Image: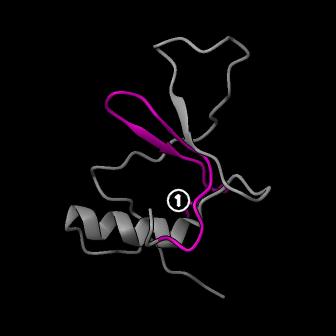
Amino acid sequence: MPRLPRVGCVYADETHWWWIVPADSDYALRWPDAAHYATGAVLPDAPHTDRLPTLIHRPSGTVPYTPPIPLYLALCRVTGTTPTWSRPVSA
């Protein structure tokens, strides 16, 4: 986390970490196999139980997101994956 320019909300359980990123952060990116990009996350109204992830990092500001490109590049580096773009990016 120290290498990222900003870290948003991060949740964890015993085996996984969840990073909150802006919608469409999978556009033109092929995330490393060790990562799973999931959409439509919903925070439950239920009280915390051992089965739910725990918030392990809360950002100091009001933006809950981690910038996706630095996170993607950090994950590629940690997993030894070469960054690849799955689709051409147009400006």
Q: Residue farthest to the bottom?
A: 91
- Rendering coords of residue 31 (x, y %): 38, 59
Q: Quadrant of residue 73?
A: bottom left
Q: Residue farthest to the right?
A: 62
Q: Quadrant of residue 39?
A: top right
Q: Residue at x 70, y 52 (%)?
A: 64
For residue 8, above or below residue 41: below
Report the magenta stretch's main SS: loop
* 5 part of magenta stretch: yes
In the figure, is residue 63 to the left or right of 26? right
Asked which secondary structure carries label 1, the reply is loop
- Rendering coords of residue 80 (x, y %): 19, 68
In the figure, is residue 52 to the left or right of 59? left
- Closest to the observer, 89 or 75: 75
Quadrant of the image for the N terminus? Answer: bottom left
Q: Residue at x 60, y 67 (%)?
A: 6
- Rendering coords of residue 89 (x, y %): 55, 81
For residue 33, above or below residue 13: below
- Closest to the observer, 50 or 40: 50
Q: Which residues are magenta?
A: 4-28
* 47 part of magenta stretch: no
Dot 1, crowdedness within 10 Å: few (<14), some or many (≥20)?
Answer: some
* Residue bearing the label numbered 1: 26
In the figure, is residue 79 to the left or right of 4? left
